Image (cartoon, helix red, strand yellow):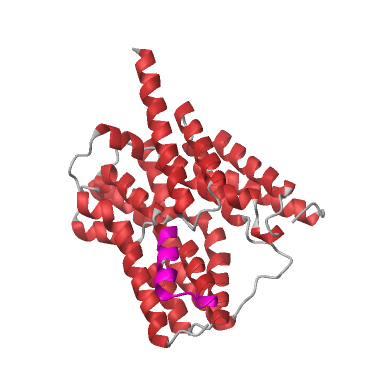
Amino acid sequence: MHATTTKTAYHEGIRDGLPYIVMVVPFALLFGVVAIETGLTVAQTIGFSILVIAGASQFAALQLMVENAAIGLVLLAALAVNLRMAMYSASLVPYLGAAPMWQRVILSYLNFDQTYMASVHKFETEPDMTVPARVAYFLGVATPIAPLWGVTTIIGALIGTKIPDGVPIDFILPIAFLSMVAPMVRSLAHFVALLVSVGVSLALAGLPSGLGLLIAAGCAMVTGAMIETWLEGRKT
Amino acid sequence: MSYSTGEIWLIVGLMALGTFAIRFSFLGLIGDRPMPPFVLRLLRYTPVAVIPGMVAPLVIWPQATDGQLDLLRIITAVVSLAVAYRSGKVVRGMIAGAVVFYGGILIGFGG
């Protein structure tokens, strides 16, 4: 019984991870091509995608490396882009904190936007899932995404396959992310939090990479939690 | 670019370690110790607090148009949001957004 539910969860994860292939392939190809153009070796390019496995920060690092920025600055800017993942990490604790340490290490390595968003959505809508089933689901989502991210980077680096100039791929990312987040708006509090996130992020767009987003996210989380508390108080 | 091979590997290695440390931080160190209810409540808003803020500048000031407001991209964003919200299905939002965006470019509307 236990084994079957875990297995089912893993398969559901794979199914829910599959659509993200459309965003992984073009950006991994692009990263491979741009990294080689920047002057990285094939091994370094692949190393980036497999060891760091965080697209936005990889592009941020490349951009600064083109400008020959100080190494400390490259690291600071690129890691700032990834700080949102500390929030992901914290938000997974109630669902996956009870998993064994070695599993939490693997889950942490694979905790990027797509695995996080798909998993949290699943865990919220199905609160009765066991911890092993949740782990299996998370790994399922990562299965079509993570290896493909690495392999497609290699293809981009080796063949230099270019996406034709006339086809803008920049907007795949917003389309996918907005589609991911919309189903998670389930209350007035969620909706207002979303608006605060957008408003503050736009207002602070001038701040260095990642910083404005962190402040926006913080404001939005506090707003959401406060509205939820306030609505509860009104009911009683 | 004028970094040495070693320097590039140093960047890759430290970024890998730093990124893992960020991802491991709470999940790894807190484990199954209980968290205060208000913190849990805050964390439930993580997805709606992070993703819209990350995407908003890409929608309003797209790099592909050198930061110029682009009607097609705004319509696409609204359609993706609306369809995914109404259907509750990520895939439907993605398909609707892709149809609007690439359809719009095909008929020569923005891009």
Q: For the point 39% across and 75% down, which residue is it?
A: B12
Residue toward you, B38 or B83: B38
Q: Nearer the viewer, residue A63 or B84?
A: A63
Q: Is residue B34 magenta?
A: no
Label the magenta part by its dominant secondary structure: helix
**Residue A167 x, y percent position in the rendering:** 70, 64
Q: Is residue A26 above or below residue A119?
A: below
Residue A9, x across and y down, in percent: 35, 48
Q: Is residue A107 in view?
A: no
In the image, is A42 to the left or to the right of A165?
A: left
Whether A108 is drawn above or below A34: the answer is: above
Q: Is residue A72 magenta?
A: yes
Q: Which of these two is toward me, A177 or A210?
A: A210
Give percent across and percent down for residue A149. Answer: 47, 67
Q: Residue at x 51, y 67 (%)?
A: A59
**Which residue is drawn at the image coordinates 51% and 54% (left, top)?**
A207
Part of the protein shown in magenta? A65-81
Q: Quadrant of the N terminus of chain A?
A: top left
Q: Is residue A83 visible to us here?
A: yes
Which residue is rendered at x = 53% and y = 47% of the image?
Answer: A204
Q: Horizontal and vertical percent for residue B102? A: 72, 54
Q: How many marks?
A: 0
